[in-house]
């Protein structure tokens, strides 16, 4: 009996050991799931501005988690370095990614690379800015012309239809910015006393924003209204002008960020034209997922809404 | 007492050893499992890096073949490419397996890039073959081949960049994993030390409990032994808490105590019996002494019996000559009575002889008291031969006369009764006198007269003699109240000459 007890104990211990080891093996094997067929999406964004494009990136990442697709976000080393962005597109072509999310930039090499990607079966989703119809693609972004009209109307309301406008844009020949400018012109054409003195470009760089801000004020002393038609302007000027007296009577900016909200709260800005940039990123991922799952029409546009925010609105709706 | 709870001391110790053994096995198992997992983790990490590096080496080697083939159009280079392609595909599959085990976007992109690279290389080789073909050399231009070669090198650049990124990432991950593994290793060590300490604590506690139980049991045993030394019959039992061996010892002590108590009781009982026997022997000696004393008295009284009887005979003859018949009869009966007393006192007589002697005595008493007392005989003839000691009935009748009916002027009556029953003979002396005093009667009825040495020596003497004669098989009862006193003697039937 005693020998049997010892034997039983030994057997029990061995069983426990075996269970433990099996458990450990199972735990390791649990990770071995076949994920090689996961949808791979690459978002090549122009820069990380801690504002507009950062929010777009957040939307893309959220969409990836929501639709269980693999999302990779890559950035050029320099802001809006189009050749490097083109190189990144080519790299993704070589990597046979399933879809590329990029901003539409009117650059031949850039578009050629996108065209090549599309020709190799890679889905192209343009975000924020659309380009000409040289290859089938999906556009998700603001109706920039309509947004330009709305910001023009806001300027008319602020100035009473009389004054001089200086426009601070991002870069030349960017279709989305050109559309916004066109919208502004359309909105003020009925007001002959409200004119556009100049259009300057900050190259999406805060240092240039500050430089252009003072340059415009110095070179165009009659300009009483500054319109920043892309996010870097509001992002840079918001904190600065909350500490010093603005050089312009009216300042309107694009895109809601913490910094632009600071400018609005301090009274430096008359208002902010907000876009649904997070929604843009999420929608782009959703559409890629749905298309790869169900097929359908890919070559189409999805326009997201804009909203004019003043300090009163901000007090009522503090989020975002 | 529930003995199954703890088991024997050896079993308890064994249990402790089993616990130690089990815990040590568990500790070794945990250590083995932990080391196995750690080494597996390290090995896996190393394997992944080696496979990745091998892919990189194969890509670089194959690309050298492609460059050679493009620049120098060497057949060997093309063959080298074919071999390298297979190696790349094999290594690429291994990396894909890594991705399946643990998904990595960078590795997934890398394997796709190597596929693209091989596709572009195949295209380049086809173009070279077409260009070198004599049948249709104009279709493929040198510029096309150059462009295709650049495309392959562009992909090689991407692959190199990707390798660099992956290495960087893998090394970062490996560093983190190594830190995690070190943490796991440290935790396992802490766990082992903790387990060892826990085992030691459990073992010590277990042993301490056993030792404490043994110590308590021994103390309890010592106290018990001390207790029974003072009081053997305290009635308690030794009950111990632990260890079958100690339980057995307690049982043995309890059994031993039972035996000692029984033997001591037996000794005490024997002692009591011996004391009773001794007392009886003393009584016998006393009785014998009394008997000898009475015999001495009798001998003294028989100094000259012949002279007494000759004198009585002479008086009797003189009474005849004087025509005094009644006197002569009285003297004759008196002489007969005295002769019986002198001759038969130490002898066994029959009931008839005893009754005849009694009748002589009654005649003498009647002559004395005339008709003042009445004596009635109710005799069973079957008892005539009953053997008995001499002088039993006469002293009893004399007692009735002296203490019972003595003061009655008239109507005093004594009934002498004999009756033969199944195996015994009953003799009764009944009178209608004043009876025994209550205190004395109570003593007599409780049997205390055996040891009484007061005035009623006669009754005690008669009883002791009967008891000796019939070897204790005698019943002597006294019933007495005013107007009726009965002495009831019941002896076993003993007929003889």
Image (cartoon, grey):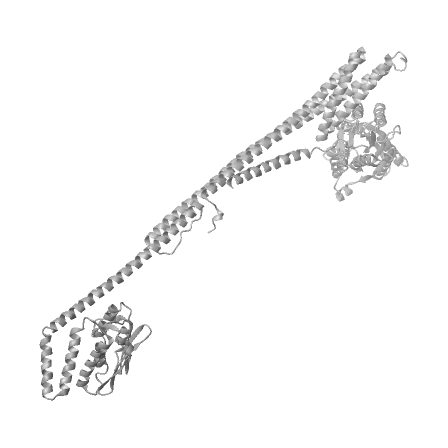
In the visual, does B284 lie left or right of A91?
Answer: left
Where does the image place residue B438, in percent across and percent down from the top left? 27, 77
Q: Quadrant of the C terminus of chain B?
A: bottom left
Where does the image place residue B335, in percent across and percent down from the top left? 14, 79
**Closest to the observer: A184 or A25?**
A25
Q: Is residue B481 above or below residue A81?
A: below
Does residue B102 appear in the picture of this structure? Answer: no
Q: Is residue B357 above or below residue A117?
A: below
In the visual, does B174 lie left or right of B113?
Answer: left
Q: Is residue B112 above or below residue B248?
A: above
**Closest to the observer: A54 or B137?**
B137
Q: Which of the 4 image quadrants contains residue B74?
A: top right
Where does the image place residue B6, in percent across and percent down from the top left? 48, 46
Q: Is residue A5 above or below residue B439?
A: above
Does residue B331 appear in the picture of this structure? Answer: yes
Give the mark count: 0
**Closest to the observer: B384 or B249?**
B384
Q: Which of the 4 image quadrants contains residue B172?
A: top right
Where does the image place residue B35, in percent across and percent down from the top left? 59, 30
In the visual, does A310 lie left or right of B482?
Answer: right
**Closest to the observer: B242 or B253?**
B253
The residue under the point 40% across, 47% down is B249
């Amino acid at each position: 009996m005693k020998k049997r007890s010892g034997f039983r104990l030994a057997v029990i211990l061995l069983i426990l050991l075996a269970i433990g080891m099996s458990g450990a093996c199972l735990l390791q094997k649990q990770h071995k799931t076949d994920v090689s067929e996961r949808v791979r999406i690459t978002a090549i964004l122009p820069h990380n501005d801690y504002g507009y494009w950062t929010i777009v990136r957040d939307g893309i990442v959220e969409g990836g988690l929501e639709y269980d697709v693999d999302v990779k976000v890559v950035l050029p080393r320099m802001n809006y370095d189009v050749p490097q962005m083109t190189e990144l597109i080519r790299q993704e072509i070589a990597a046979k990614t399933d879809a590329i999310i990029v901003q539409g930039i009117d650059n031949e090499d850039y578009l050629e690379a996108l065209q090549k990607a599309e020709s190799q079966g890679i889905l192209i989703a343009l975000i924020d800015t659309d380009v000409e119809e040289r290859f089938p693609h999906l556009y998700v972004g603001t109706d920039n012309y309509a947004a330009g009209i709305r910001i023009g109307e806001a300027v008319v309301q602020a100035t009473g239809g009389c004054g001089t406008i200086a426009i601070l844009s991002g870069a030349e020949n960017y279709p989305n910015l050109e559309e916004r400018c066109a919208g502004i012109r359309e909105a003020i054409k009925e007001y002959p006393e409200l004119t556009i003195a100049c259009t300057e470009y900050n190259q999406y760089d805060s240092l240039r924003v500050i430089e252009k801000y003072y340059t415009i004020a110095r070179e165009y002393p009659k300009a009483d209204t500054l319109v920043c038609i892309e996010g870097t302007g509001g992002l840079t000027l918001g904190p600065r002008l909350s500490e010093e007296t603005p050089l312009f009577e009216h300042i309107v900016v694009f895109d809601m960020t913490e910094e632009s909200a600071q400018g609005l709260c301090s009274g430096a800005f008359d208002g902010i034209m907000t876009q649904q940039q997070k929604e843009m990123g999420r929608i782009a991922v959703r559409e890629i997922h749905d298309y790869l799952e169900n097929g359908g029409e890919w070559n189409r546009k999805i326009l997201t809404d804009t909203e004019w925010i003043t300090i009163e609105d901000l007090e009522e709706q503090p989020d975002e | 007492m529930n003995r199954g709870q703890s088991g024997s001391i050896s079993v308890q110790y064994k249990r402790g050893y089993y616990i130690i053994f089990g815990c040590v096995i568990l500790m070794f198992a945990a250590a083995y499992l932990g080391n196995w997992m750690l080494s597996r983790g390290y090995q896996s990490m190393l394997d992944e890096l080696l496979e990745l590096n091998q892919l990189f080496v194969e890509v670089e080697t194959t690309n050298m073949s492609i460059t050679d083939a493009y620049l120098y159009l060497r057949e060997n280079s093309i063959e080298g490419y074919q071999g390298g392609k297979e190696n790349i595909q094999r290594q690429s599959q291994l990396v894909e397996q890594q991705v399946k085990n643990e998904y990595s976007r960078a590795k997934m992109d890398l394997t796709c890039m190597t596929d693209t690279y091989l596709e572009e290389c195949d295209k380049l080789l086809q173009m070279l073959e077409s260009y070198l073909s004599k049948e249709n050399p104009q279709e493929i231009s040198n510029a096309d081949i150059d462009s295709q070669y650049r495309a392959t090198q562009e992909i090689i650049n991407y692959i190199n960049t990707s390798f660099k990124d992956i290495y960087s990432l893998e090394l970062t991950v490996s560093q983190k994993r190594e830190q995690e593994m070190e943490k796991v290793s440290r935790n396992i060590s802490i766990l082992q030390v903790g387990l060892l300490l826990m085992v030691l604590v459990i073992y010590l506690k277990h042993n301490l409990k056993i030792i404490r139980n043994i110590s308590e049991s021994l103390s309890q045993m010592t106290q018990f032994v001390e207790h029974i030394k003072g009081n053997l019959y305290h009635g308690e039992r030794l009950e111990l808490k632990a260890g079958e061996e100690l339980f057995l010892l307690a049982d043995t002590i309890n059994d031993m105590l039972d035996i000692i108590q029984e033997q001591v009781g037996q000794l005490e009982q024997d002692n009591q019996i011996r004391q009773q026997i001794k007392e009886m022997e003393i009584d016998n000696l006393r009785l014998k002494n009394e008997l000898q004393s009475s015999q001495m008295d009798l001998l003294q009284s028989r100094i000259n019996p012949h002279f007494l009887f000759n004198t009585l005979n002479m008086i009797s003859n003189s009474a005849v000559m004087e025509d005094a018949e009644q006197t002569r009869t009285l003297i004759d009966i008196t002489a007969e009575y005295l002769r019986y007393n002198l001759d038969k006192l130490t002898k066994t007589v029959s009931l008839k002889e005893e009754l005849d002697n009694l009748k002589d005595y009654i005649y003498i008493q009647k002559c004395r008291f005339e008709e003042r007392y009445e004596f009635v005989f109710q005799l069973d003839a079957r008892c005539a031969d009953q053997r008995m000691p001499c002088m039993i009935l006469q002293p009893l009748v004399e007692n009735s006369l002296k203490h019972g009916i003595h003061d009655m002027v008239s109507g005093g009556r004594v009934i002498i009764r004999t009756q033969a029953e199944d195996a015994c003979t009953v003799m009764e002396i009944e009178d209608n006198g004043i009876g025994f005093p209550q205190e004395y009667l109570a003593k007599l009825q409780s049997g205390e007269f055996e040891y009484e040495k007061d005035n009623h020596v006669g009754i005690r003497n008669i009883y002791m003699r009967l008891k000796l004669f019939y070897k204790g098989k005698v019943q002597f009862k006294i019933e007495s109240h005013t107007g009726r006193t009965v002495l009831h003697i019941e002896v076993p039937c003993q007929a003889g000459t």
